[in-house]
Amino acid sequence: RRERVEAARGDKAIRAVALTATAAWTMTRAGDTLTLRAKGATRVLARVEPGRLRRLRAAMLVSGLDAGRHWRCFLANATARDKAFAALGDGTRAAPAFLDSYLRAASYVATIDALSRQPTPDDPDAATRALIGHDSERLMVEDFEGLRLPASLGDKRRLMEIAAWIEHRLRPMPAAQGQPERARPPRVPLNDAELAALARDVNADAEMKQLFCVP
């Protein structure tokens, strides 16, 4: 009962600040921001380029952090160079130099993860095969050359090989004596700078922790 009551109160609070709670707004547009003003209320809407938004979301997912606690701070820091999002910060925001490399690498990893979860007709598990045709749209997954929806278990294995190679690069383990280094899979479009940026996340780098506001 308590949960239902709190949910109802939260719903009322959200409705009270929603744009639709006010009948008329005065709009002012400047660049990629739209400012709405009404008596006693101001709302600033900022436009995010869809591709950029996909990468920001992917970075949040790959980080493994609680979005409820870290998304707003991460978004404020990641958009620190964008005047459209100036209202998000308090003057202490900072986008690290490696941000763009990290966003692209994180998006690539997120795409591999999303594609490798798709069922294939030759999956040995009947329950998994039954999910074919009922998959939801992948609206927030970036397209990368060389990555496609798997049509067979072989395709999924190739995706997992790429994921394993990236993991090996991020968390290098001492090679067994006489064992060759894991070969780079073909057509992986990540350069050394992008892999290094991704490794910062794995190694809890100080700048990466600052980006996500991790104590």
Image: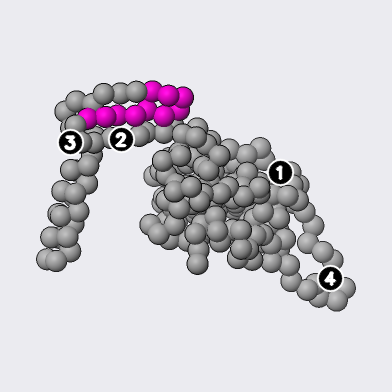
Label 3 or label 1, whichever comes before in sequence order: 3
In the rendered image of this protein, does residue 2 appear above or below residue 71?
Answer: below
x, y percentage for residue 85?
45, 38
Res 66 quadrant in image: bottom left
Q: Kindly tell me whether residue 194 is visible in this rendering.
A: yes
Secondary structure, mark 2, is: strand
Label 4 or label 3, whichever comes before in sequence order: 3
In the rendered image of this protein, does residue 188 appear above or below residue 45?
Answer: below
**Which residue range is magenta in the image?**
29-38
Amino acid type indicated by mark 2: Arg
**Marks 4,3: beta carbons within 8 A:** no
The residue wearing badge 4 is 179
Picture mark count: 4
Spatial separation of the CA atoms under disc 2 and disc 1: 40 Å
Extreme residue in the bottom direction: 177
The residue wearing badge 2 is 43
Amino acid type indicated by mark 3: Ala
Label 1 or label 4, whichever comes before in sequence order: 4
Packing grade of label 4 (10 A; few <14, some 14-19, many >=20) is few
The residue wearing badge 1 is 189
The residue wearing badge 3 is 21
Spatial separation of the CA atoms under disc 4 and disc 2: 60 Å
- Image quadrant holding the N terminus, namely bottom left
Spatial separation of the CA atoms under disc 2 and disc 3: 12 Å
Q: Nearer the viewer, residue 192 or 125?
A: 192
Packing grade of label 2 (10 A; few <14, some 14-19, many >=20) is some
**Marks 2,3: beta carbons within 8 A:** no
Q: Which mark is residue 113?
A: none
Spatial separation of the CA atoms under disc 3 and disc 1: 47 Å
